[in-house]
C-alpha cells in the first residue's frame, strides 16, 4: 500500500484519460484544480523523452487549512498532488502521498486528526474512481 509515503493504484486508462477522470471526479466533489502539469511534454520541449507522466495539483482550503494551523510547514505538501505515469511495461499508475505519512512527516497532532482522516478517505475514493478501480 504505502511505500515511503506513496500509494500507487493501477489505472485501467491511459495517463491523459486517468487525469481527465481525476479532474472530473475532484471538481465534482467540490475541490479545486490548481494545476495540471504534463511532464512528458516538458521533456519533449528540451529534446528529451519521457513516458507519459502528468501531475494534478488539487484541494480545498477546508481540508488543508487545519493541517497548516497545526503545523504551518505542512503547506509544503499542500495542495494535494496525484501523479499519473506509465511504467516500463506500459501499465499506468496513479500515485499520491499517503495522508497518514504526511501527518507523521509534519508531526501533526490531535488538532489535525479529523482532517487527515477525511483527506485519506477522500483520496482513496477519488483515486479509485479515476483509475477505474474498486468502484461500487
Image (spheres, rainbow, N blue to C red):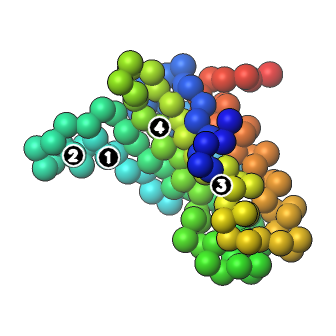
* Distance of label 3 from label 1 (alpha carbons): 23 Å
* Distance of label 1 from label 4 (alpha carbons): 10 Å
- Which residue is drawn at the image coordinates 76% and 78% (left, top)? 70
Count neighbours of disc 1 (C-alpha within 10 A) and say few if under 14, some if 14 to 19, many if 20 or more.
some
Count neighbours of disc 4 (C-alpha within 10 A) and say few if under 14, some if 14 to 19, many if 20 or more.
many
User: Horizontal placement of 94 versus 129: left or right?
Assistant: left
Q: Quadrant of residue 95?
A: top right
Tag 4 secondary structure: strand
- Which residue is drawn at the image coordinates 59% and 65% (left, top)? 78
Name the residue beneath numbered marker 3: 31
The answer to whether marks 3 and 2 mark residues whose Cβ atoms lie closer than 8 Å is no
User: Horizontal placement of 70 versus 53: left or right?
Assistant: right
Along the line of sight, which residue is nearer the eye, 16 or 81? 81
Question: Where, quadrant-wise, is the N terminus in this rendering?
Answer: top right
Which of disc 2 and disc 4 is earlier in sequence? Answer: 2
Tag 2 secondary structure: helix
Which of disc 2 and disc 3 is earlier in sequence? Answer: 3
**In this rendering, the label closer to the viewer, 3 or 1:** 1
Name the residue beneath numbered marker 2: 43
On screen, 96 above or below 92?
below
Q: Quadrant of residue 65?
A: bottom right
* Distance of label 4 from label 2 (alpha carbons): 16 Å
- Which residue is drawn at the image coordinates 15% and 48% (left, top)? 45
Which of disc 4 and disc 1 is earlier in sequence? Answer: 1
Of all residues, the one furthest to the left in this rendering is 47
Name the residue beneath numbered marker 1: 39
Q: Is residue 25 visible?
A: no
The answer to whether marks 1 and 2 mark residues whose Cβ atoms lie closer than 8 Å is yes
Q: Which numbered dot is residue 84?
A: 4
Tag 1 secondary structure: helix
Residue 129, how many percent across, how many down?
A: 66, 31
The answer to whether marks 4 and 2 mark residues whose Cβ atoms lie closer than 8 Å is no
Amino acid at each position: 500500500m504505502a511505500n515511503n509515503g506513496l500509494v500507487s493504484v493501477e489505472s485501467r486508462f491511459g495517463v491523459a484519460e486517468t487525469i481527465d477522470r481525476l479532474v472530473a471526479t475532484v471538481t465534482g466533489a467540490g475541490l479545486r484544480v490548481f494545476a495540471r502539469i504534463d511532464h512528458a511534454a516538458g521533456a519533449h520541449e528540451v529534446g528529451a523523452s519521457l513516458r507519459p507522466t502528468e501531475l494534478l495539483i488539487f484541494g480545498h482550503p477546508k481540508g488543508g487549512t487545519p493541517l497548516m494551523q497545526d503545523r504551518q510547514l505542512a503547506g509544503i505538501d499542500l495542495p494535494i498532488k496525484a501523479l499519473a505515469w506509465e511504467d516500463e511495461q506500459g501499465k499506468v499508475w496513479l500515485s499520491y502521498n499517503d495522508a497518514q505519512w504526511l501527518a507523521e512527516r509534519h508531526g501533526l497532532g490531535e488538532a489535525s486528526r479529523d482532517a487527515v482522516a477525511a483527506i485519506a478517505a477522500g483520496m482513496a475514493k477519488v483515486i479509485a474512481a479515476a483509475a477505474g478501480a474498486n468502484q461500487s
